[in-house]
Image (spheres, rainbow, N blue to C red):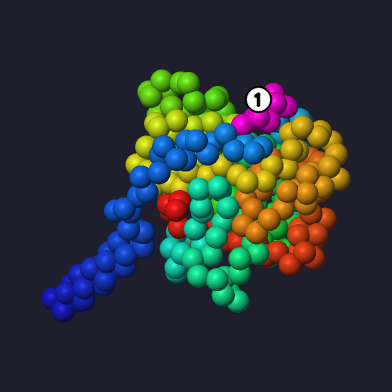
Amino acid sequence: MFKKTASWLLLSVIILSACSNQAPANTTETPTTSTEQSNTSTPTATTPESSETATSETPATPATSTEGTTTGQSSESTSAKDSEATAPAEYTYHMNKNYDIVPNKESKETPKKVILLTFDDGPKEKKMIDSMMDTLDKHNAKAIFFVNGYRIKTHPELLKLIHDRGGIIGNHTQDHIVLKHESKAKVTQQIEDTQKLIEDTIDESPRFLRAPNGATNDTVHALAKKHNMLYMNWSVGSLDWVNQKDPDAVISNVMDQLHSGSIILMHELPWTVEALDELLTKLEAKGYTFVDPNAIEPKAR
Ligand SMILES: [Zn+2]
């Protein structure tokens, strides 16, 4: 009996220490706020954003089509998946100040010619999410989904669906308002409410933050640091929020701006979903592979 208790105690200690090992050490975060801030006005980052809000925010179709396509939403075996997702074996890539993804050490396993796929402003609709995840699976690709809290409130099951199917969740604030000129309290509320909502829904803390319109300030960067998130804009805009209903335009906009390490901004929009398979096929044909967001370091450098 005594022996049994002792071995239980020993087991618990082992488990506890294993858990604490999983948390990536976040003692040193980059003091990059000022430089990063000037970066927010990079290429396609800020300009299209007002239209982004205008066009992609109105849900194209109310989420009626819940029956969706083929793939089931297997919510089993999520706990095992969770521990895999939160505990990257090793960070092999980092993001630089131009919002490009760079290998820490270039090799066959960690090539320079990579793309990071990101989809903003969801989760909206099961049908679109199923299709995106099917396409990503087909190409063995992972992506970050920058989600809004107000949408999670309406459809927590869609956030779970993305997560269960291997999508990486990023914080894109509560209401998709432009944070740049908001008070510290408002910015904090916008980011922290969403953070909590995501944690409560998928039992995992987002590691990535993107401000609506890519428009940041010191408070945004401080909050990213506080919550161990990598602040991430993008280096290639698909312009899917401008060229409405045109899958070919989404593809050509990406292909025209393409470079090694591109972080591609797309949205959960019907024409983007439609374009995705062909886009990923074209990217692969050019020799690009898709970087796993879990392999990206928590700080820019
Ligand atoms: Zn957005």
Residue at 77%, 64% in the rendered image:
286
Name the spot of residue 299 as percent of width and height, x first: 42, 52
Which quadrant of the view contains residue 221? top left
Name the spot of residue 295 as percent of width and height, x first: 51, 62
Assign the N terminus to one quadrant of the image: bottom left
Q: Kindly identify which residue carries mark 1.
A: 50
Residue at 75%, 38% in the rendered image:
240
Which quadrant of the view contains residue 17? bottom left
Name the spot of residue 40 as percent of width and height, x first: 54, 36
Residue at 45%, 69% in the rendered image:
89
Instruction: Count neighbours of disc 1 (C-alpha within 10 A) and say few if under 14, some if 14 to 19, many if 20 or more.
Output: some
Q: Vertical placement of 263 versus 77: above or below? A: above
Q: Is mark 1 within 8 Å of ligand 1?
A: no
Residue 41 falls within the magenta-colored stretch: no
Q: Vertical placement of 252 versus 34: above or below? A: below
Direction from residue 225 to residue 141 in the image, left or right: right
**Residue nearest the observer in this picture, 243 or 63:** 243
Q: Vertical placement of 182 versus 295: above or below? A: above
Direction from residue 256 to residue 91 in the image, left or right: left
Q: Secondary structure at mark 1?
A: helix
Residue at 45%, 58% in the rendered image:
297
**Residue nearest the observer in this picture, 154 or 142:** 142
Majority secondary structure of magenta residues: helix
Span colored in magenta: 46-55
**Residue nearest the observer in this picture, 116 or 112:** 112
**Residue nearest the observer in this picture, 203 or 58:** 58
